[in-house]
């Protein structure tokens, strides 16, 4: 069985002062609930002021992800996000522990446990940027990143996507197609999900996107053995 | 706040729109088998799964699933759907893919005779990659996802529902379909459509309370249909606004629905399905 952690933020009071969101709990807690209903274990569920930036930062950079985001198989993060021309993804928190924004260049995942990083936030896999430059330094045994190109909707009508995805993958469905199917929306929301996988070579990376499930026992790849990244999206 | 419009609400609106009572969803083993047969399966296997609100029928690599709250239908050929092929490229033009999808929809009776399935777009599942040495993997197309939008009495249906996607693979085979298309029980009555100024006032008032720039990307009078997880009692008109908010480096997309009929029959939005609890956390 898989282990799951979620962190979500709707409220962003000062000093981390951004526009409020409304349905980040829906997507994260929905994912957790679906996985639990499929027999997996939810290890932590932190929301709003109890969701902390240091939970996603590696000890190499002074963080404590070994106790949280990197301690589980799946971690789901839902909040504001952005990816600038510096090729750094930023996730935004509503409390300053220790910072208001988490940065992808301070992340190393998989050196403790994490296989699947789910980021329900804008520009988490922004195809107008160099997504390898954004995420390569986070792959230390991590298998895949799941995210979105451009903006993603915060609405009741699309808030069930976390549950829908969790229901499918928790039951053994292919991870990549499940994310792309359940997070893609047509008119009028136009959400565009993306999945990125690491591999030792072209065949390995693409094979993982084609077939990897939570039961398929595809091994972790050490950071210095990653030879290829492959990604998929529906436009 | 600054409110701008990439799309404006049409000036000309119908004076009235019909409201429909929706039929209870049909999701049983019998329905799953019947649906499987319409999709071209034999329908004689005994492999069923009931998990949560989903009921699934499996016949070899092919799976048909129905959702008990919405009647949503998923069909997948699990050996072929979403799988990047190495032996051939996807070379089917969009018009051909649409033709294949429409023939499939007609053959399998996926859309009621009295309704229109209007082409929204031909989407594509795409794959790309790169080596650590910088060698690029040529961008390839895996399928065409022909997305058809429900239209009722010439009014489009917006939302995560009211849509049907048919997935065509490089062999021109339909390898998947997703349909959220609730059945109509009966036409209740026509309701007068509220003035467009009523809707504009609602979105303008909303935007006044948002920090940053608000850009309306979609504005329409439409029916609105929920996604697969939710029950819905009526199909009724709404003014639909989808807007982007940009505040410095942070942005997001949100939606506002304003009931468009002078009489309202059902809810356009429900309670949160999975509300989060704010639990204190010691440092």
Image (spheres, coloured by chain):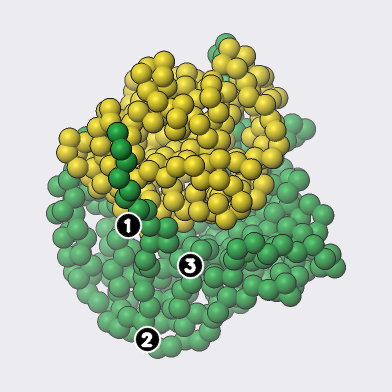
Chain colours: A yellow, B green
Question: The residue marked by circle 1 belongs to what chain?
Answer: B
**Which is nearer the N-term, disc 2 or disc 1?**
2
Q: Is residue A203 above or below residue B50?
A: above
Cβ atoms under marks 3 and 1 closer than 8 Å? no
Quarter of the image holding residue A126?
A: top left
What residue sits right under mark 2 in the picture? B190
**Which is nearer the N-term, disc 2 or disc 3?**
2
What residue sits right under mark 1 in the picture? B255
**A4 sits left or right of A81 in the view:** right
Q: Nearer the viewer, mark 2 or mark 1?
A: 1
Residue occupying the point 47% across, 86% down: B187
Give me the C-alpha separation between circle 2 and circle 1. 26 Å
Residue occupying the point 71% across, 37% down: A216
**B187 sits left or right of A206 in the view:** left
Q: Position of residue B223 (x, y in %)?
A: 41, 71
What residue sits right under mark 3 in the picture? B230
Quarter of the image holding residue B7?
A: bottom left
């Amino acid at each position: 069985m898989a282990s799951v952690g979620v962190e979500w933020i709707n409220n962003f009071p000062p000093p981390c002062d951004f526009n409020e969101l409304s349905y980040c709990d829906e997507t994260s807690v929905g994912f957790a609930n679906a996985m639990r209903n499929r027999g997996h274990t939810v290890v932590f569920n932190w929301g709003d002021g109890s969701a902390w930036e240091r939970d996603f930062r590696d000890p190499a950079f002074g963080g404590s992800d070994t106790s949280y985001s990197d301690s589980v198989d799946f971690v789901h993060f839902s909040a504001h996000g952005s990816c600038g021309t510096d090729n750094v993804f930023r996730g935004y928190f509503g409390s300053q522990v220790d910072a208001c924004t988490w940065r992808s260049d301070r992340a190393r995942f998989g050196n403790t446990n994490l296989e699947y990083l789910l980021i329900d936030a804008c520009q988490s896999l922004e195809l107008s940027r160099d997504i390898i430059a954004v995420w390569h330094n986070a792959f230390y045994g991590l298998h895949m990143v799941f995210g979105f190109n451009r903006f993603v909707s915060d609405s009741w009508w699309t808030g069930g996507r976390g549950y829908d995805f969790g229901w499918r993958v928790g039951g053994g469905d292919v991870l990549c197609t499940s994310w792309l199917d359940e997070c893609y929306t047509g008119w009028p929301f136009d959400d565009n999900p993306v999945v990125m996988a690491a591999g030792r070579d072209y065949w390995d990376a693409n094979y993982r996107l084609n077939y990897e499930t939570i039961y398929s026992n595809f091994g972790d790849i050490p950071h210095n053995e990653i030879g290829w990244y492959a990604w998929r999206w529906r436009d | 706040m600054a409110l701008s419009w990439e799309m404006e609400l049409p000036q000309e609106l119908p004076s009235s729109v019909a409201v429909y009572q929706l039929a209870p969803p049909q999701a049983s083993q019998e329905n799953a088998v019947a649906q499987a047969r319409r999709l071209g399966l034999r329908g004689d296997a005994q492999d069923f799964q009931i998990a949560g609100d989903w009921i699934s029928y499996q016949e070899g690599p092919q799976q048909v699933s129905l959702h008990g709250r919405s009647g949503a239908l998923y069909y997948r050929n699990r050996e072929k759907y979403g799988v990047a092929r190495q032996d051939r490229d996807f070379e089917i033009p969009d018009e051909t893919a649409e033709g294949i999808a429409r023939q499939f929809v007609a053959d399998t009776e996926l859309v009621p005779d009295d309704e229109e399935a209007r082409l929204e777009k031909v989407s594509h599942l795409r794959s790309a990659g790169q080596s650590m040495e910088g060698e690029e993997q040529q961008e390839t197309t895996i399928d065409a996802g022909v997305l058809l939008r429900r239209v009722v009495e010439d009014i489009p249906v917006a939302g995560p529902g009211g849509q049907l996607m048919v997935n065509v693979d490089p062999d021109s085979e339909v390898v998947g379909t997703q349909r959220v298309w609730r059945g109509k029980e009966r036409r209740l009555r026509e309701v007068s459509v509220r003035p467009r100024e009523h809707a504009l006032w609602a979105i303008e008032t909303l935007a006044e309370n948002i920090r940053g720039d608000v850009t309306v990307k979609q504005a329409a009078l439409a029916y609105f249909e929920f996604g697969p997880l939710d029950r819905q009692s009526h199909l009724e008109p709404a003014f639909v606004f989808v807007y982007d908010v940009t505040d410095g480096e942070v942005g997001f997309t949100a939606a506002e629905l304003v009931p468009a009929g002078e009489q309202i029959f059902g809810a356009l939005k429900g309670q949160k399905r999975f509300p989060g609890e704010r639990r204190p956390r010691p440092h």
